[in-house]
Amino acid sequence: MDDLKFGTRDKRGNWTPNATLEIAPFWIGKWSRIGHFIKDMIWPWNAFHMATALLYWAFVLPDIETMKTFGWGWALYLFAANAIGIFVLYGAIEMFFYVKRKQENRFKFNGKFPAENPSDVFWFKSQNLDNFMRSFFVGIPIWTAVEVVMLWCFANGYHVFGWLDWQDNWLWLVALTLLVPAIHEVHFFCIHRLIHVPVLYKWIHSVHHNSINPSPWSSLSMHPVEHLLYFGEIVWHFIIPSNPIVMMFNSHAVGFGALNGHIGFDKLEVTEDTPLDTHAYAHYLHHKYFEVNYGADGIVPLDKWFGYWHDGSKEAEEQMKARFRAKKEKLKARQARTTPAE
Ligand SMILES: [Zn+2]
Ligand SMILES: [Zn+2]
């Protein structure tokens, strides 16, 4: 597929899409785009997360009686399912698009592949190994632990609103399912903006940002405190009227869905004619410029409202540079005030 029909490539091989990012159409009165937007929100990624949540419900999670007591047996089984799921999903994309490079650098934002740049910031100087180990030995155990605690709470009725069943509450539960991407954007924006505060950035979030050119394994490569904050999103289902299946869907959207922002390609050529949109561009720009796009796709456009939105256009680039310049000036002025004159 010719990616130059959809974007441009610079001298360094970096590809930029022609289409700029847009916040959700209902914020900007583009009512005719709502159907397209809803389809895009559901298919295929969230439909996939819902499908895996249902598969877990049917085949991985034990019955409610078992979940009433903490047990290593079912917790480890859940951990194994999560680890295998991540390995297969992230690993498949890593394998086909980063190791075998079946699409070479078509639709790839950064023309280079992480393996071409060994760096001291990573364990064993390898972004892949470092990211992989942080994901499997820290990230997935923390994710599973949050799920285990939430399932144990639901099973025991330790919940502000109890366990809502589908029969009597289907309308709300369907609405809540559709609201999960909005919950994700608000939660992620808040915790993410918080860990960009300089002292927290240095201590916690810099680990994730070591991957300036992210690949699938970068998705869950974080400091353990960031893992806790990130997967803490699942805990919202403790204080909103919910059901374990919706909670597990949210959990999968966070755990498996972390992949989206870090795929590194705008489209995956799954077949020759049907490329798969990755929704990776907004978060790619965050990894490139750091202080833009703290949230996600603009479903709840907090970035736009707070002035952090970068849609990929030249104008957005200029606005960002002006913001960075103003910040620098402010910092300089403050330093001048606090440093006594000689
Ligand atoms: Zn990231
Ligand atoms: Zn960040």
Image (cartoon, helix red, strand yellow):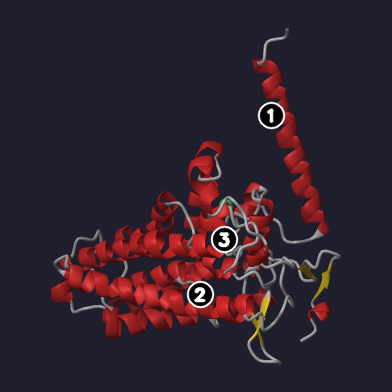
Query: What is the secondary structure assignment of the residue under circle 3?
Result: helix
Q: Which mark sits nearer the N-terminus, 3 or 2?
A: 2
Residue 331, disc: 1
Residue 127, disc: 3
Q: Is residue 193 above or below residue 314?
A: above
Q: Amino acid at mark 2?
A: Tyr
Q: Please give left or right for residue 71 compared with residue 58 in the image.
A: left
Residue 333 position by quadrant: top right
Query: What is the secondary structure assignment of the residue under circle 2?
Result: helix
Which quadrant is the C terminus positioned in? top right
User: Cβ–Cβ below 8 Å for labels 3 and 2?
Assistant: no
Q: In the rendered image, which residue does mark 2 sit on?
A: 90
Q: Amino acid at mark 1?
A: Leu
Q: Is residue 106 above or below residue 325?
A: below
Determine the quadrant in which ligand 1 lies. bottom right
- Does residue 52 appear in the picture of this structure? yes
Q: Amino acid at mark 3?
A: Gln
